[in-house]
Image (tube, helix red, strand yellow):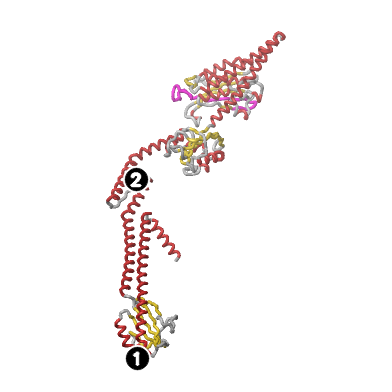
Amino acid sequence: MLTLLKTLHNAIDRWWSEFTLQTRLMAAATLIVSLVMSGLTFWAVNTIQQDARVNDTRFGRDLGILLATNVSPLIAEDKLTEVARFSSRFYSSTSNIRYIMYADEDGKIFFGIPYSEAAVQNSLTIQRRIELPEDYAKNVNLPMVRQHLTPDGEVTDVFVPLKQEGKYLGVLAVGINPNPTVVTSSNLTRDVTIAVFISIWTMVILGVVLNALTITQPIKELLVGVKNIAAGNFKQRIDLPLGGELGELIFNFNEMAERLESYEEQNIEELTAEKAKLETLVSTIADGAVLIDTDLKVILVNPTARRIFNWESKELAGENVLHYLPAQVTIKLTKPLYQFASGEATGNKDRSFEHHAANALGFPHHKEAEGGEFRITLTEPTKRTIRILLTQVLDRDRENIKGIAITIQDITREVELNEAKGQFISNISHELRTPLFNIKSFIETLYEYGEDLTSEERQEFLHTANNETDRLTRLVNDVLDLSRLESSNTYHLECVEVARPIEQTLRTYQLNAKDKGIELIKEIEANLPFVLGHYDLLLQVLANLVGNALKFTTAGGRVAIRTYQLNPSNLNFEKKGKVRVEVSDTGTGISSEDRDAIFDRFYRVENRVHTLEGTGLGLSIVKNIMEKHNTQINLVSEIGVGTTFWFDLTLYEDAQKPEEALQ
């Protein structure tokens, strides 16, 4: 039962909520007016009935007293026939009398109209008695009046005591019918009131239904249509056969929807193409780009950001960016991101990516956005240093935050260059300080104490200063060579006969090798093809390698230069032929821990295995020159056995162009 009542209550609430405020007010006003009018009508009817009851009471009392006065002597003399005759005439002449009954002092009815004496007793001789009211007193002279309801209406009962010369003879009961005119008018008024009340509410309900069918329903349809249009559904149409103002409104709505649909069809391709261009632009930005909303959920990620954060196989759209960032980045960015999303961040930065990203995703263009910068070192998937820029994407009025743009810049190379630059400056300062200090010391000594020194001492001081000057000159030249190689982006390669720079190098170092007791050997394969290279740079490479070999080889040792052609069939990784150049010695060799660092600037093996001096830049220059030739320098070495440096050069006839620039 409770479930049924609850269901009914919910249905009524749902039905009532569908009505507009105006309809509800009209219904409430109608209810109040109808209740007031009905109340007034029923009050008037009740007043009329009360007045009629009072009149019936007065009439019955007077009639009972009159009848009792006339029949009391006859009853005292036991002239019941006369009583019956008189009562009959009285009953016939008065239409309002319903009954007349006489009872003795014990309440036994002995005569009544319209009852006969025979009807007083039935066949079982059951005697009828009159039921007097509880408050009826036999010694009271005034009549007793009451009303009771019957199927024919309310009847007024009048009980009049019958007395003759002070003796109580019994009681006279007279029943008075209500005034038929009053009863008819009261009933008519009541029925009319009920009919009017029902008619009013019938009209109200019909009006509500008519309003729902003719006005409310079309308005609801229009409301649904407007919401669909606002949501971008331009195919929405309203098909209701209505005329007048509502019909014109529906017609105009359908026409507007058709125009919007036509406009959308005409411009959707252009808008899609423009958005694709902007998304492509964001995707091709060299820096990593991530765009998130104010809930920190990912909207857009470009390929660079995926590569930096190892997101290639992850679908991040709609996910919280903090759940996928590396741990180091999450620790750094959690607080700033929440501050940016809530509008607490400060600082202005103008970033082109944020403009493009905002436009591509439908955000308004803005000239400036709030930003912050962080530098973080990552260890996975590879060790790198990144710079992260946070920028708030604001609306056109710069009042509301639409999202946050994260720009990721890989500055690993920049950091390495800065470290190398600092190391280079530190090393070059140290290398320059030693010869300059020695030169200054010896010259100051000669300047201040030259006359006190012997000619041999002066000659020794000058010889040392000269050697230090040569050392300083070599260092400066090597630095200039290395700087020129690193700063120059273009070297034109040409056809080179590799035997020529080899022979020139041998001529240069022949006397030096002879003085040190070292055998200088050349092993050049006959009929070598021309190679693609730069003659002067190759000559510098060979000079550095042969010079180092002579420096680290003791008397009685050998230094050999070999060159020969490699067969393409013997090279699994090359389709072209190569010419290999080797420089071997039987010197001290290079330990395994030195091999990885030997090509770094200012790294000198002599600091670890012997005391020979050098600038530490020769092999760095060799490595750089080989890179300009699109190849690399390699080495094989063993302590106490010797070292072999070798590199490969491309054949000139296999080169794609007779002359090409090395980048």
Residue 477, given in percent of the width and then of the height, sits at 57, 18
The mark closer to the camera, 1 or 2, is 1
- Looking at the rendered structure, the secondary structure element under dot 2 is loop
Residue 29: x and y, percent? 37, 58
The spot of residue 369 in percent (x, y) is 48, 35
Q: Is residue 68 shown above or below 558?
A: below
**Amino acid type, label 2:** Phe
Picture mark count: 2
Q: Nearer the viewer, residue 326 or 198?
A: 198
- Is residue 658 located in the magenta-colored stretch of the structure? yes
Q: Residues within 10 Å of mark 2 (few under 14, many from 20)?
A: many
User: From the viewer's perspective, is 271 left or right of 496?
Assistant: left
Q: Is residue 658 left or right of residue 454?
A: left
> In the rendered image of this protein, does residue 123 appear above or below residue 441?
below
**Is any part of residue 8 visible from this angle?**
yes
Please state, as top left, top right, bottom left or bottom right, where the N terminus lies in the image: bottom left
Estimate the x, y position of residue 435 in percent, counting from the top left. Answer: 64, 18
Q: Badges 1 and 2: C-beta atoms under 8 Å apart?
A: no
Q: Which residue matches tag 2? A: 234
Q: What range is drawn magenta here?
A: 636-663
Towards the viewer: 235 or 198: 198
Residue placed under numbered mark 1 in the picture: 79
| 651 falls in the magenta region | yes
The amino acid pointed to by label 1 is: Lys
The answer to whether residue 128 is seen in the rendering is: no
